[in-house]
Amino acid sequence: MMASNAVRRCTIFGWIFVLAMVLGSAQYACAKDDKAPYPSMAPLDQYLMGRDAEIAMARSAAPEAISRDAEILVLGQHGYETAVKGKNGFVCDVERSWMGPFEKNPEFWNPKVRGAGCYNPQAARSVLPIAYLRTKLALAGLSPAEIAEGIKAAYAKKELPPVEPGAMSFMMSKQTYLTDRGITSDGAHNMAHVMFFTALMDTANWGANLDNSPILLNPQFNGSPEPVEVYMVCTGAWSDGTPAPVS
Amino acid sequence: MSRKIIKTISLGSFVLVIALSPAWPTQAQESGALYERMAPIDQYLMTDRNTEIAFARTAAPESISRDAEVWVFGRHGYEAAVKGKNGWVCIVERSWMAPFDDPEFLNPDQRVPLCLNPPAARTHLPLTFKTTELAMAGQSKTQMFDSIKAAYDKNELPLPEPGSMCYMLSKQQFFSHRVGNGDPHLMFWFPQKDHQDWGADFPGSPIDIHQYSPQPITEFDISVSKWSDGTAAPAN
């Protein structure tokens, strides 16, 4: 392979992931309200993990060479707290379901969701604050619409920073659980990828989601309300170097 | 991975593989001597304009390149061959866009198609055109290095705009005799002064970095699984 470790395949399944996030929710939308799988926030305990397990999972988002010196956050009763101080500017955490899209997202309160990420310094400064605020508002018992309003207001008051150029993160944890739906051919609920964060722009500027493009637009933020685009490129390898599911 | 250290790609494109096999020093010496001087211009040209247009477009999926502007290399430098509609520009770069320390810097066989997104078209193409002009003027590598440095020092060449990137997914791309066709990959450019940290080149990282000189540009490369035509790239 040319550029270090294999960054392999999963374009098709990345599409499935994106489609699952955006269009797949339609299946839930069509369902009767009383069958909505996660209509409201579950008891907080269901979202919490053991501290050591959460530290280890957060670190598994990136290769050990990066995450071993990263700051590690864990979710506590009152929000994220620093569990391990870092040395290299990267910050790793395990994000919960409320980091998903606000609209047409039936899994917004899915307590099984665990998304391990390691943010580079640019993203730690300019994207991670979104996670802090969403989490704070979620733990305060707000509805998705109220959380979205809170985020919108924070941007309006410049309490949340604009995304910095070069902001990116690793999401290469084998343990991550993104959705109840299988998003790879083997039915996994996860895929190894890196994410790039930009200010809102014409997504055609990166050729995202076009036929055969390896770049996917993740609808996670997308201006609703965060003024941030999230692009994904599959890596085809987990953080431990083993091949990620492909086809 | 145990037999070779894989590094980098050029600003315009070229993956530099430093092979650690016993044959490497000999190969480097030979290719370095072989490509020390510019070959006759004909050797850098493609047989016909339409072939080069089609080749340039293979850098990106057809969904992107079909509406891109396309430039071709002629006896007097690059010229616009096809007007675009989507702000992207596809071009086949030649060996002088490789790093200055590349032993195949003037290898006339090198053909590297890129499709640049709109920010990169505005900020990378001027470097391609300038470097090509210097090569065609017969400057030595040292002279070219100094000229490019001076151009950046005087702000005659732009730094990468935020979001500058390109696709290099052509199955027919040819980097060098050592590297061959390489992998399909994406490249992202930043000013070096931004001090970007993408965790590149760490063991297990899917991202490579190249710091150019004298261009004050940082390049990140990430391999992808498929060529522009949708076929799978070999998984080495």
Image (cartoon, grey):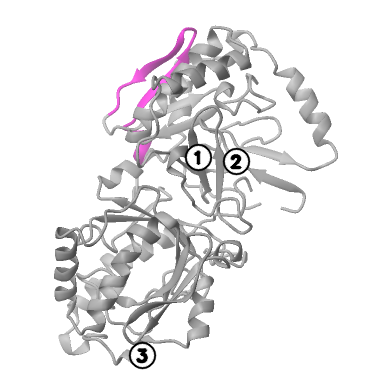
Q: Are marks 2 and 1 in contact (CB under 8 Å)?
A: yes
Residue A239, numbered label: none
Q: Pick the residue in front: A63 or B215.
A: B215
**Residue shown at 52%/60% (left/top)?**
A88
Calculate the distance from the C-alpha at mark 2 to the C-alpha at mark 1. 8 Å
Residue B8, numbered label: 2
The stretch drawn in magenta includes residue A201? no
Where is A89 relative to A200, above or below?
below
Residue B219, numbered label: 1
Residue B64, percent across and down? 35, 38
**Residue shown at 46%/32% (left/top)?**
B114
N-term mark: 2 or 1: 2
Residue B142, percent across and down? 62, 16
Residues shaded magenta: B63-84
Specify few, some or many for label 3: CA neighbours under 10 Å numbering under 14, 14-19, or 20 or more. Answer: few
Residue A46, numbered label: 3
